[in-house]
């Protein structure tokens, strides 16, 4: 046992990856009777991200806003959690497809080339494009693999580089991870890809997790808030937890797992000044189409019931004000207000 602990400690020391400011986590829960639930945390070193929720109907005309703009019309209605009133970071559409944007410092997007005439899509619009256009993960994989547009990186209003990767899951539990590495799109598609954090790239995360599976989570789990450690804990707990058909129990379970991989408010680690607090969490019940949100500075959870939302074409975009509204609580389905759609953040040049 001492030998095993020593080897685990050495491995952990050898895989230390500097955590960048946005250090989020995502996991998919497979309950009984098709009870699929996806949860994620949003970690960021600035406490105010101007986070709100937007309801977008079918038939909404979209424009990427870049110099060579990409345009589309939404096929499906959705609710998206947005940041800086210029980027969709998370959301679920009316078909139960969930998209989550997480930080990946190793991201390298396709470079501009004179012979590349494709329109461009800022990664601030990546989540929304997926929610607007696809009902299932398989459809999204098929569509995004065509690379009909070139994804370009934004810079966050705080000056941080907008290097991210994308996870999606559908109501069946099928998942896909999309990363741009060395300018190439890399896709991992399969139900087994149910967890994602940040660095290192996803294939390395899988390898690290396989090692810890040989150790066994009931013996020891890595406990830091490094991305690789959070990946291992999320993988173990999301599968070890009771797999229930009851939506209340399933949602509560996913909230508990996401809190386990959250970064406590105010935690500082010597030598890692950019470890980021968890600011908010979302949990999406993809079977029953209910989308939950909690600000970590609020004792209350809010939720939206899609069965009572109007996604009809022409019904207009609507906004649920979360920023500066920490006392908001409970069912907010009826509280979206008409609002003018914001423009996506785009690259400076």
Image: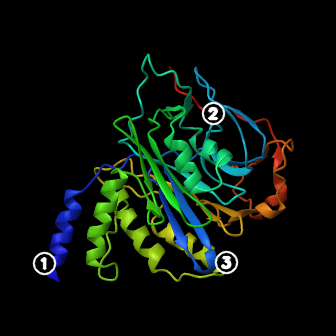
Q: Which residue is mark 1?
A: 3
State the separation of the CA atoms marked 3 and 2: 35 Å
Residue 30, image x, y percentages: 54, 74
Q: Residues within 10 Å of mark 2 (few under 14, many from 20)?
A: many
* Secondary-structure class at tag 3: helix
* Residue found at x 31% / y 74%: 213
Closer to us: 24 or 289: 289
Residue 248 left/right relative to 272: right
Closer to us: 261 or 168: 168
- Spot the residue most to the top: 114
Q: Is residue 336 visible?
A: yes
Residue 312, image x, y percentages: 84, 49
Relative height, residue 243 to residue 76 (above, below): below
Upstream in sequence: badge 3 or badge 1: 1
State the separation of the CA atoms marked 2 and 1: 52 Å
Residue 284, image x, y percentages: 63, 63
Quadrant occupied by the N terminus: bottom left
* Secondary-structure class at tag 1: helix
* Callout 3–callout 1 Cβ contact below 8 Å: no
| Residue 248: numbered disc | 3
Q: Residues within 10 Å of mark 3 (few under 14, many from 20)?
A: few
Picture colour scheme: rainbow
Q: Which residue is mark 2?
A: 344
* Residue found at x 57% / y 77%: 31
Residue 221 left/right relative to 131: left
* Callout 2–callout 1 Cβ contact below 8 Å: no
Upstream in sequence: badge 2 or badge 1: 1
Residue 234 left/right relative to 321: left
* Residue found at x 34% / y 61%: 206
* Callout 3–callout 2 Cβ contact below 8 Å: no
State the separation of the CA atoms marked 3 and 1: 42 Å
Relative height, residue 57 to residue 98 (above, below): above
């Amino acid at each position: 046992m001492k030998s095993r602990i020593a080897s685990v400690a050495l491995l952990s020391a050898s895989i230390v990856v500097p955590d960048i400011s946005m250090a989020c986590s995502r996991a998919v829960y497979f309950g009984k009777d098709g009870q699929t639930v996806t949860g994620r945390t949003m970690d960021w070193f600035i406490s105010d991200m101007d986070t709100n929720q937007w309801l977008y109907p079918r038939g909404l005309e979209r424009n990427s806003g870049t110099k060579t703009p990409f345009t589309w019309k939404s096929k499906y209605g959705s609710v998206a959690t947005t940041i800086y009133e210029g980027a969709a970071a998370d959301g679920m559409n009316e078909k139960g497809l969930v998209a989550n944007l997480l930080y990946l410092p190793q991201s390298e997007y396709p470079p501009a080339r004179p012979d590349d005439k494709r329109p461009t899509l800022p990664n601030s619009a990546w989540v929304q494009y997926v929610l607007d256009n696809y009902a299932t993960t398989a459809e999204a994989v098929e569509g995004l693999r065509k690379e009909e547009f070139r994804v370009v990186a934004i810079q966050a209003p705080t000056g941080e580089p907008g290097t991210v990767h994308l996870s999606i899951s559908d109501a069946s539990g099928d998942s896909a991870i999309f990363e741009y590495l060395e300018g190439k799109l890399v896709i991992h598609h399969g139900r087994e890809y149910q967890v994602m954090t940040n660095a290192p790239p996803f294939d390395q995360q899988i390898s690290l997790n396989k090692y810890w599976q040989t150790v066994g989570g009931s013996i020891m789990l890595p406990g830091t808030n490094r991305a690789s450690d959070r990946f291992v804990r999320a993988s173990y707990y999301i599968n070890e937890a009771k797999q229930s058909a009851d939506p209340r129990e399933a949602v509560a379970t996913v909230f508990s797992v996401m809190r386990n991989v959250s970064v406590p408010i105010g935690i500082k680690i010597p030598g890692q000044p950019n470890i980021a607090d968890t600011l908010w969490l979302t949990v999406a019940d993809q079977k029953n189409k209910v989308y939950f949100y909690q600000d970590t500075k609020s004792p209350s959870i809010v939720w939206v019931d899609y069965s009572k939302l109007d996604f009809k074409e022409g019904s207009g975009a609507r906004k649920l004000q979360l920023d500066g509204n920490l006392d908001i609580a409970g069912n907010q389905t009826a509280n979206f207000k008409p609002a003018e759609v914001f423009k996506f953040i785009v690259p400076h040049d």
